[in-house]
Amino acid sequence: MKTLKPIVTLFFALFLLNSCSDDNNENTDPPISGDYKDGYFVTNEGPFQNGSGTITFVGNDGTVEQSIYKKVNGDDLGNIVQSMVLNDDRAYIVVNNSHKVVVVDRYTMEKIDVIKGDNVNNPRYFVIFKNVGYLSNWGDPNDPSDDFIAMIDLVTNEVINTIPVGEGPENMVVSNATLFVNLEGGYSQNNKVISIDLGSNEVKTITIVGEVPNSSSVDFLGAVWVLCGGNPSWTGNETAGRLYKISDSDVSYFEFELEDHPEHLTYGNGRLYYNLNGKVYEMTLSDNDLPTENMNGFDGYYYALKYNDDKLYATDAKDFASEGDLKVFDISSAKLLETITTGIIPGDIDFQQTQ
Amino acid sequence: MRYNLSFFLSFFCVLAYTQNNYTNELEEIVLKGNFSPTLNSGYSTETISDSILKSTYQSFGNLLQNTSNLYFKQNGNGMVSSISLRGTGASRTGVYWNGIAINSSLNGQTDFNTLFANGFDNVVIRRGGGSVLLGSGAIGGAINLSDEILFNSERDGNILFGFGSYTTGNTQLTGRISTDKLYAKISFGAFGSKNDYPYLGTNLNNENGELKNYNFNGVFAFKLNEQNTINFYTTIFDSDRNTSRTLTALSKAKLLDFNSRFLLDWKYLGNRYTSSFKMAYLYEKNTYFFNREQAEFSESLSKKFIGKYDMTYFLNKKILFNAGAQIDNIKGKGTNIEKAVQNDFTSYLLFHHEPISKVNYNVSIRKGFSNQYEIPFIFAVDFNAELSTNLNLKGNFATNYRLPTINDLYWEPGGNPDLVPETSSTVELGLLYTKAIFEFNLTTFLIKSNNLIQWQPVSTDIWHPLNIQNVKNYGLELSVLLHKKINTHIIDFKIQYDYVTAIDQGLSKQLIYVPNHKANSIFNYKFKSWGFSYNLQYTGKVYITTSNTQSLNAYTLSNISINRSFFKNKLQLSFQVNNLFDEKYQSVAYRPMPNRNFNLNIHLII
């Protein structure tokens, strides 16, 4: 879910400019006033270097509809659709390389507003707390000191404040009126979780965690779990992945093997799930050790992994140059329920907001 | 113009034999090296004349696209441009400079917007697999840019100035001087453009598309005696490009390319024996700024040394042998390349025979060794038969390879030192019919490629190259040429059509960015000092997803030019309109190409 610098330079070096898009499928049909009320969404980053991301809708009745934003609004969403958040009747779509957040009607996908400007710069993720949106921004990816969280008034859709943070703010979660921001490091590797008091909007604590905190979740008791991938071997300073638990009173962690770099932590029904070396692992909140046995039948190198309603939703970006897949697994029966074709590079899955 | 050189070859042969010596063929072999028609009788070649090279100023890619029927994938006007010949990838078309392979040692490709052909005298396009004679990567075909050396005691100068839309300006100054023993040519060019054309149908323009570049060519040759000449060639290219925005995203990036190439060639021309000893040094460096306003960049560079010996020996009038050996030493370095060294040694042998009058064939083999991988044994057979005075049949079968490049082997992270060379088998058959004012050429081909190197994701942030892809290409190429002169009216007409299918054998899908259909036609009319030219190009639909679910529309382009010469051709003015009908098109998705635009060229010959 992040486009690391080595990949950028690699693509450049290889001239792999084989981007893909639906630009020229000229759509002359009038916008369909589709009803996207009952179902969930997958955001697709779109082709890597040039093109537009898209949104796939999966209806509860089993219907699947691609490129719904373009269908409704007639124009492209933008380059690298990073993530999306649903909130009441709105959806906020973060478009990383077009430096904007597109606000749409969550039920019809009709565009309502676009949040952009100097204070939306390489945006990554969006969370909402009491009618304020918090948007993590890398700023200039090569500048380690201009990263920030933008606070957005959801009534006016304007940035009302920015909070400077360290390099590479990525995933965020809210627990006990506190925002926990993973400083993953952007194009390099960082190792912090920063907590921001959502009353004063000031930084409370900076917790040093393992390298590359790539995902986080909040359990039902309010503890924040942060999965750190560790430094990959190509950095020349490989470090082991770690799973941190941050609660009011305590910070503790589990350590993986040196060559293990887990990612995609997701939480549900008292259990944590993550993806490591092409396997999916499950552990309970009270486990004293990391699981050694992987979940049978869930294998894959996933691009996104999310828990929802006793199911695991996992995306496969395949060759990054054609449509990806979304796999839906039933956890209790360990069965693959369905495989759904998505857009190009499916990076986020969004269910009804539970906030 | 497309000639079947073997046709001329047979003509030359007859001439040579009647003169009862080998001079003509030997001279041709010495001049054209491994691109010589004698050694390539079963292949079709096309030559672009120096008058075209000298009178227009454009990147090599645009020139080839406008004068020949080649397909380029261009990342916006002036940006990175790569070729796909016969549906093969950009690194499977060999690009040569005076017979020396100049595809990047880093990625195996050539960016055709980092070559400008004005300073050169000759361009040859040789289609079909040619690794045996030409080495790694000549699979779809090969293109040779060369300088001509003449000891004719003449001197001339060419001055070209051009102006165009989007604040574009260019100049090329070339001077040549020779005696009966010495030859020198110096050519210098500069090009700059704001390149800020509007994106048709939007309110955007080609932001961050500025580019400028400089080129220098130098040739110095010494004729020691009737048998021995020593030639020194150099070419330097320096380019500074911002990289264009797309329809959906701004860009602040910038790309610098610097290439310098040096070649020393000692040629010997004997009575029945000729040889060429070459030493070349090629330097390339590219620097990429994510944000041109900041100091941070990433860069890659390579240094390549080539030593090559090639000889030809006529056993008798009907049989000749050609043999060669080459060493390549490549060093790579860069932000993502620690330390990379590639050492290759290859040698080849060719047997040419004319068993009966008007029929000749070649059999050739090549084998090499490397510190990195096993270089496969490859071979080729080609023939040309003059069926009647008007009709020629030619054909070839060849096995070919492409060696992994520095990036494939050493890129960090992900590079794979265990890669092996890609292999391809190519076969083609062609018919050429010529009659007075008319020429008709039809060629069909088949390419089967195995173990193609493909970069694949192994995790979300690591990609890794593997010998994994198998591809089958087939197609046909058709060209018709007409040349008619009525008093002072001269009409030239050329039409070319290529049909290509390139199927990924694993996916059973057409490769992305390979059009099934591509056509080009040029109509030239000359009357006294006036000239008029109309160029019509068609590029078919290309797929842009490997699943073939999305595509870019086909497009048709028209370019016209009017020129007039003054003072006995000493001054030529030409005015050109490109994309006459304002076609809205993209070569690469989301990267619109220019609307209708103009340029004016002033060419002085002194």
Image (cartoon, coloured by chain):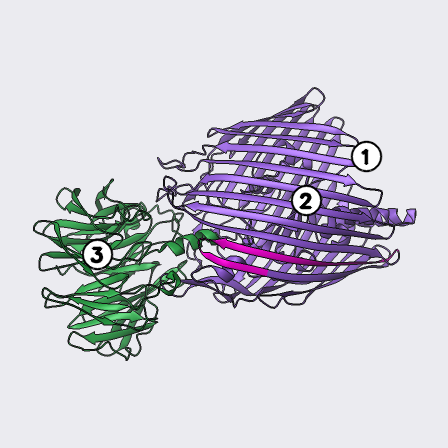
- On the picture, is B332 further left or further right than A88? right
- Going by the numbered disc 3, the residue's amino acid type is Tyr
Q: Can you say whether B494 is above or below A62 in the image?
A: above
| x 32%, y 59%: residue | A346
Q: Are marks 2 and 3 on the same chain?
A: no
Can residue B385 be seen in this snapshot?
no
Which residue is disc 2 drawn over? B480
Does the segment drawn in magenta span residue B285? Answer: no
| x 15%, y 76%: residue | A286
Q: Colour of chain A?
A: green
Which residue is disc 3 drawn over? A36
Q: Colour of chain B?
A: purple
Chain ID, mark 3: A
Marker disc for residue B180: 1
Q: Are marks 1 and 2 on the same chain?
A: yes
- Going by the numbered disc 2, the residue's amino acid type is Val
Q: Main secondary structure of the magenta part?
A: strand
